Amino acid sequence: MKVCFFDIDGTLIVSGGAGQKAFARVFREQFGVDEISQAVSFAGRSDRAITLDLLAAHDVEPSDENWRRFHDAYIAVLPESLAANEGTVLPGVEALIATFAAADGVEVGLLTGNVIRGAEAKLTHYNLWHHFAFGGFGDTHTSRDEIARAAVVAAGEHLGISPNGDSRLAVIGDTVHDITCARAIGAYAVAVPTGLTSIDELRAAEPDLAVETLEDAKTLIDWITA
Ligand SMILES: [Mg+2]
């Protein structure tokens, strides 16, 4: 069994800023923050970590209650933000997923900082959600390594296997965080510079494979179908 975990933003899709704009709207409407701090990084981080950092940056208590308040408002406004901002499914994604679906013993999952209902909204908007039956999400964890470990547990539960035993894992993502979290679970790390990180920056983090787009993923397909 091989399990291939996909990141979402910058890897499967770009949302035209829909996610960040939904964050900004919720902070404005729920917490009275006119403009969210540019000092808080979004790329490759969990929604929970981003939210707690933004709350603290704007002197709002980073409590569970405020996290829940953010989450529910964000989920409510995200579909509208996705519809209002033009994004796209990234090149090669649909063909790669179809290749994996047709291969014996290959399963695909998600490994993302998005909260699960945010992942569902984004991938439903781009007609990809139905491909993914399990994953690790950014609801409870702030560290991507912890999300990766949760993704492995979810894969094991869904597939009835022990993925850390005789299974091979791969993580495909667009940031250095995706590469480092692949290391945390002993997975093959595939980097693709279709987000905000350049291929040189990604290569410096020593992924097993770096490709310009997922259209160039022949090496990945060879590895996963070997
Ligand atoms: Mg990403």
Image (cartoon, helix red, strand yellow):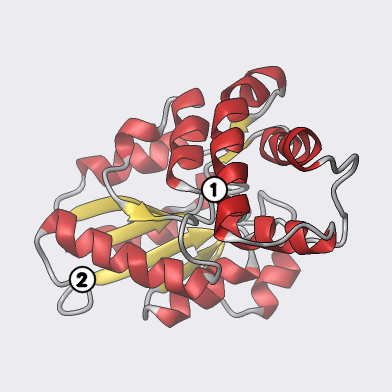
Residue at the (14%, 51%) spot, across then down: 104
User: Residue 28: x, y in percent?
Assistant: 81, 36
Q: Earlier in the sequence, mark 2 or mark 1?
A: 1
- Image label count: 2
Give the residue type at disc 1.
Answer: Arg
User: Residue 146: x, y in percent?
Assistant: 44, 73
Query: Callout 1: helix, strand or loop?
Result: helix
Residue 41 in view here: no
Badge 1: few (under 14), some or many (20 or more) residues near its Cα, within 10 Å? few
Task: Tell me if 97 is positioned left or right of 159 in this view.
Answer: right
Circle 2 is placed at which residue position? 163
Q: Which quadrant does the N terminus fall into?
A: bottom left
The label nearer to you, 2 versus 1, is 1
Q: Which quadrant does the C terminus fall into?
A: bottom left
Badge 2: few (under 14), some or many (20 or more) residues near its Cα, within 10 Å? many
In this view, 95 is above or below 181: above
- Judge by depth and name the residue closer to the eye, 80 or 76: 76
Residue 211 in which image quadrant? bottom right
Residue 84 in view here: yes
Which image quadrant shows ligand 1?
bottom right
User: Residue 52: x, y in percent?
Assistant: 67, 61
Q: CA distance from mark 2 to mark 1?
A: 32 Å
Residue at the (73%, 63%) spot, across then down: 53
Q: Residue furthest left?
A: 160
Task: Tell me if 6 is positioned left or right of 85 in this view.
Answer: left
Residue 68, numbered circle:
1
Residue 39, numbered circle:
none
Residue at the (29%, 46%) spot, across then down: 100
Give the residue type at disc 2.
Answer: Pro
Residue at the (58%, 58%) spot, across then down: 48
